[in-house]
Image (cartoon, rainbow, N blue to C red):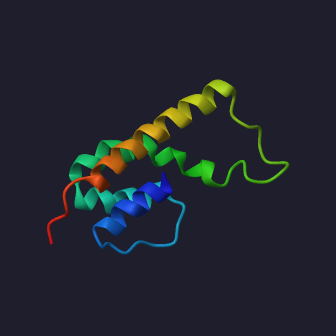
Amino acid sequence: MEKALRAFLVRHDVPFPKTHDLGKLGQLAAQLDATLDELVDGIVDLSKYAWMFRYPGDPVAPSAGQASAILTRAASAVKELHARIAGPEPAA
């Protein structure tokens, strides 16, 4: 997700901060395209997965069902952003 949002911002020549926060990156993307508001609202809570389960001894991992639902949401958002990145050139 993070990389897809960054790619969208790069496509539009918009600088972005070094962050894993999907909310911050999503806000920048939504400023360019207000129709992304709903997409961003649906993924902003996924930011925690950038760090939560990264190291041994981390909190309990999500169940298989939770992980599947999270991956489905993320894949759907990436697919939508990819379509917008691959679309027509942004207005200058």
The residue lying at 51 percent from left, 59 percent from top is 21
> Is 26 left, or right, of 51 in this rendering?
left
> Is 90 left, or right, of 41 in this rendering?
left
Give coordinates of residue 42: x percent, y percent: 41, 40
Residue 69 sits in quarter: top right
Check the image and report above or below for 32 versus 78: below
Check the image and report above or below for 33 versus 42: below
Give coordinates of residue 61: x percent, y percent: 73, 37
Which of the image's four quarters has the C terminus?
bottom left
Q: Among all residues in the image, which is located at the extreme right?
A: 57
The number of discs equals 0
> Is 37 left, or right, of 24 in this rendering?
left
Give coordinates of residue 26: x percent, y percent: 38, 56
Check the image and report above or below for 74 versus 52: above
Give coordinates of residue 59: x percent, y percent: 77, 43
The residue lying at 34 percent from left, 43 percent from top is 80
Check the image and report above or below for 49 versus 7: above
